[in-house]
Image (cartoon, rainbow, N blue to C red):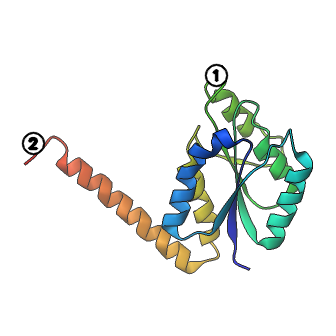
């Protein structure tokens, strides 16, 4: 049973934001699955999914939510695995309400939180957590960071040059 990242969103309308996490995990060779389960509309289903995902090897959960953003906290209350919250844009505060909701978890129920809509960073953080126990993944992540730094350096080197 290989460890994997379980990605949970509360609504199908959230799926486009989480595609970035899926792409990043694919690029790094990290197993993952995605489910759409509302903490409010299907709490029993969410309970069963978290327990089942743990039994099958979920090592980290990524949970994306907007507005009141309860999903990451509800998942964190049901597992001892790390939970990474992705606040989503929307509502009258354009994601700030979701960010504050996820960040302000009560003591004893931690949720790591990334920036509003930043599913890529959630995937990278999940990868770093898994890499603590997986040397090959740690090497792939290190190589990914080197490529990222090289791309930034190349962009800066070419900035201001006329094409051709």
Residue under pointer 2: 162
Where residue 74 appears, x then y in whole percent?
Answer: 84, 46
Image point (56%, 51%), residue name: 19
Kindly identify the residue that appears in the image at 37 percent across and 65 percent down: 146
Residue at numbered disc 1 = 93
Q: In this view, does 83 lie above or below 13?
A: below
Residue 2 image-quadrant placement: bottom right
Quarter-wise, where is residue 56 in the image? bottom right
Residue at the spot 63% in from the left edge and 36% down from the top edge: 88
Closer to the N terminus: mark 1 or mark 2? 1
* Disc 2 secondary structure class: loop
Picture coordinates of residue 50 (x, y %)? 83, 59
At a point 12% along the width and 44% down the height, the residue shown is: 161
Q: Is residue 108 above or below residue 6?
A: above
Q: Position of residue 142 (x, y in %)?
A: 45, 69
Q: Which of 123 and 139 is in front in this view?
A: 123
Taking 126 as reference, is 98 above or below it? Answer: above
Marks 1/2 in contact by CB < 8 Å: the verdict is no
Q: Which of these two is toward me, 155 or 41?
A: 41
Task: From the viewer's perspective, tell me whether residue 49 is left or right of residue 148.
Answer: right
Quarter of the image with the N terminus is: bottom right
Q: Distance between the residues labelled 1 and 2?
A: 41 Å
As helix, strand or loop, the secondary structure at mark 1 comes to loop
Is 155 left, or right, of 19 in this rendering? left
């Amino acid at each position: 049973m290989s460890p994997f990242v379980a990605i949970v969103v509360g609504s199908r309308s959230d799926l486009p934001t989480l595609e970035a996490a899926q792409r990043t995990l694919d690029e790094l060779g990290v197993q993952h699955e995605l489910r759409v389960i509302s903490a409010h509309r299907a709490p029993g289903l969410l309970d069963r999914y978290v327990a089942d995902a743990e039994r099958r090897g979920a090592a980290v959960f990524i949970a994306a939510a907007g507005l009141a953003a309860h999903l990451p906290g509800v998942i964190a209350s049901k597992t001892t695995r790390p939970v990474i919250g992705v606040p989503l844009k929307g509502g009258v505060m354009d994601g700030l309400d979701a960010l504050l909701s996820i960040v302000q978890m009560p003591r004893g129920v931690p949720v790591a939180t990334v920036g509003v809509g930043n599913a890529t960073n959630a995937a990278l953080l999940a990868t770093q957590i898994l890499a603590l126990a997986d040397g090959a993944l740690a090497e792939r992540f290190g190589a990914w960071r080197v490529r990222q730094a090289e791309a930034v350096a190349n962009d800066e080197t070419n900035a201001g040059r006329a094409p051709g």
